[in-house]
Amino acid sequence: MLQHSAMPLVGQRFSVCQEQQEMTDQLVGSVCSAVRNSTVVWQVTGLVRLLDALDVLQPTKAARQALLTAAVEGLFENNSSNSSNNSSNLLSSQTDDSMLQLSHLLLSELPLAAAYGRFAAAVAARKDNSLLLKQLLQAESVGQALDSASVQRLVAFQVANLERSSVVPPFNWRMPHAKLPSHPQAQLFLHGPAESFTLTGFTGINGARREASRFQGTYNNSKPSTYSMTATAQGVGRNACLLIRKTRDGISCRCTPGSC
């Protein structure tokens, strides 16, 4: 008697479970289509929260895999007619947190690992990617996959970043912010690449010395200085001149020995 009365209840439970599974499958299918073909930017961090929510519904492993595969296709392979650049725009719009999450998903789900090379290329293409590369290389999942050629690309990119940041720019003599409005020729010289410049047109050494003193006065009144040079009076008579030479120190004005 009890067995006969229990049969309808078992059947009802089976029917409910079946309906729940069908609803879950439909939900997963709809979400897969949305993330694969969406023209709206979505974040991988949101995808992770969605996966956590689906776990409550107890979907099959295949359902989870289908959703992850659709997401990867949306990020890397979307050729939707609505936007030919949708995939690249979606990937480039991911936050650093989303990129960290995406890295973990790609490395923790074996069927998705093949996309990691494209992921690494996307990281390299990002502007100011040094912090993201540092965080990726500190991630446990990346550390466990260092033998992978795709992960090694991240290491190479970071090494290149460090090499670029440690290179000292080549020295040049240009002083582009120098201002000498009373000496336009000298100002033009300071702005250029030449190390020295000779100012002529004096009638004697005393005129050259006075001009050197003017340079000294101009420099003293323009602290902090935007240029550095020496002004040396030399020569005699109409051959007197002022030799201006750029330096890496403060300006000084002096006469050559025997001319003062």
Image (spheres, rainbow, N blue to C red):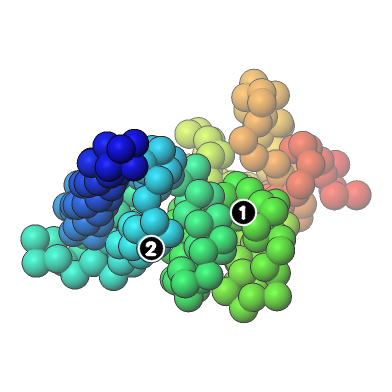
Nearer to us in this view, 186 or 61? 61
Q: Residue furthest bottom?
A: 149
Q: Quadrant of the C terminus?
A: top right
Secondary structure at badge 1 equals helix
Q: Residues within 10 Å of mark 2 (few under 14, many from 20)?
A: few
> Mark on residue 258?
none
Answer above or below: position of 201 versus 217: below
Q: Residues within 10 Å of mark 1 (few under 14, many from 20)?
A: many
Residue 106 image offset from top left, x and y in percent: 50, 62
Residue 195 image offset from top left, x and y in percent: 67, 59
* Disc 1 residue type (three-letter): Leu
Q: Quadrant of residue 169?
A: bottom right
Nearer to us in this view, 29 or 241? 29
First-in-chain label (2 vs 1) = 2
Nearer to us in this view, 84 or 228? 84
Front: mark 2 or 1: 2
Q: Residue at x 34, y 42 (%)?
A: 3
In the rendered image, which residue does mark 2 sit on? 62
Q: Residue at x 56, y 39 (%)?
A: 178
Nearer to us in this view, 124 or 245? 124
In the rendered image, which residue does mark 1 sit on? 136
Q: CA distance from mark 2 to mark 1?
A: 28 Å
Q: Quadrant of the N terminus?
A: top left
Secondary structure at badge 2 equals helix
Q: Residue at x 74, y 38 (%)?
A: 251
Residue 53 visible in the shown view: yes
Position of 66 with respect to 166 (left or right) is: left
* Disc 2 residue type (three-letter): Ala
Q: Residue furthest left?
A: 82
